[in-house]
Image (cartoon, rainbow, N blue to C red):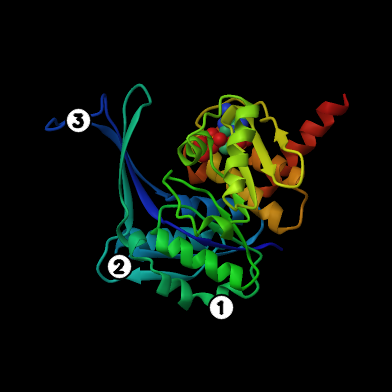
Amino acid sequence: MANIIVVGSINMDLVVRAPHIPIPGETVLGSGFGTFPGGKGANQAVAAARQAARVTFIGRVGDDAFGRQLVVGLQSEKIDTQHIGVDETAASGVALITLDAAGQNSIVVASGANHQLTPEHIRKAESAFINADLLLLQLETQLETVMAAALQAKAHGVKVVLNPAPAQRLPEELLPLLDMLIPNESETTLLTGLPVETLAEGEIAAQKLLTLGIGCVVITLGARGALLVSADKPAIHIPSFPVNVVDTTSAGDSFVGAFSVALADGSSLEVALQRGCAAGALAATRLGAQPSIPTKFEIDQLLLNAQKEQRT
Ligand code: ADP
C-alpha cells in the first residue's frame, strides 16, 4: 500500500450564491449558504486516500469549530491526522466564495492557521517520513515550510511531488529537490513565461523547467489531458477521457492525488498518467470539490470500460 505524506492547507469553504458579485460598498441579498471542507492540501489528501493509499497529513487548524470539523472530516477518510496541530492564536483557514447567477465566482482566502505551519512543525513530524514513499506539496503554506518538508523528504529517500498552486515564483533551491512538478496550463505559463497553446509548446515549457533541475514535469491540460516530459525519455501525452462535464472544480486535485498514489505504488508513468486523467475526468462530471473526488473503484471501472471500447 502506497504511503503518502501531504504537507498543506486545510480550509473551510464558505459559499454563498448571489444574483451578482457585489461591488465595493454594495450589499447584495444572497441565498443558499453552505460550508464545504476544502484547501488544496486537504483535497489532495482525500484524493490520495480514496485511492486506497495510507495518507498522513501535516498541517494546522485553529482552536475553533471549523478546525474540529475539518479534522474529523479527514479522519472519516481514514487519513492520519496526528500531525495536524491546533493553533492557539490563528483561526482555521477559510475561503469566502461568492457564486453569481452566471457561475462566475469571487474568492477571498484567509489562510489563518495554515500560515502558522513552520519548518519546526515539519521537524516534529519527522517520524511520518521514515516509511513514506512520497511527499505531496502545494503552495498554500509558507514557502519556507514547503522547502523544509522537501529537504526532510530527501533526507529520508522520499519522492517529492509539488503541485505549484496557487501559482507563484519558486525559490531556485527548491527546484532540484522536486522529483515531479505538476502545474496546470496557467501555472506553467507563470513559471516559464511561455505559452502552452499546443502540445509542442507544452513540451518546450516543460523542458525549460527541467533545465532548472526538476526531475520530471507533468502539465495538466484540462480537456486536452496531460503531458509528461522528462530528461531521458520521449514525452508522453495522454488525452482526456470524454465525459459529460458538470463542474471541473477539484479535477486538478483529483489528478494529483491519483497520479501520486500510482507513482508511489510503482506503476509505470503511463499508467500513473492514465489514472490521473481518469480521476480528473470523473471529478469533472460532478458538482463540488471533495464530494466529487473519485474512488479507486470508480477509476478502475472507467479504465476498464475505456479498454473495452478500444477493443470493439
Ligand atoms: P486544474 O483544475 O488544476 O486547472 P486541469 O483543468 O488541467 O487542472 O485538470 C486536471 C486533469 O483533469 C486534466 O489533466 C484532465 O485529465 C482532467 N480534466 C480536466 N477537465 C476535463 C474535461 N473537461 N474533460 C475530461 N477531463 C478533464
Is the shortest distance between ligand 1 and the CB of mark 1 under 8 Å? no
* SS at mark 1 in the image: helix
Using the rendered image of the protein, determine whether residue 281 is visible from the camera's viewpoint.
no
The N terminus is located in which quarter? Answer: bottom right
Classify residue 34 by image quadrant.
Answer: top left
Residue position marked by numbered label 1 in the rendering: 127
Q: Quadrant of residue 102?
A: top left
From the viewer's perspective, is residue 82 above or below residue 99? below
Q: Which residue is mark 2?
A: 63
Q: Which residue is mark 3?
A: 29
Label 3 Cα neighbours within 10 Å, binned few <14 / some 14-19 / many ≥20: few
Say whether residue 255 is left or right of residue 239. Answer: left
The local secondary structure at tag 2 comes to loop
Position of 285 relative to 5 (above/below): above
Q: Is residue 9 left or right of residue 264?
A: left
Using a 10 Å C-alpha cutoff, classify the residue at mark 2 as few (fewer than 14 neighbours), some (14 to 19) or many (20 or more): some
Report the amino acid beneath label 3.
Answer: Leu
**Left or right of 304, for residue 249:** left
The residue at 65%/28% (across/down) is 200
Where on the image, by quarter, is ligand 1? top right
Give percent across and percent down for residue 310. Answer: 83, 27
CA distance separating discs 1 and 3: 50 Å
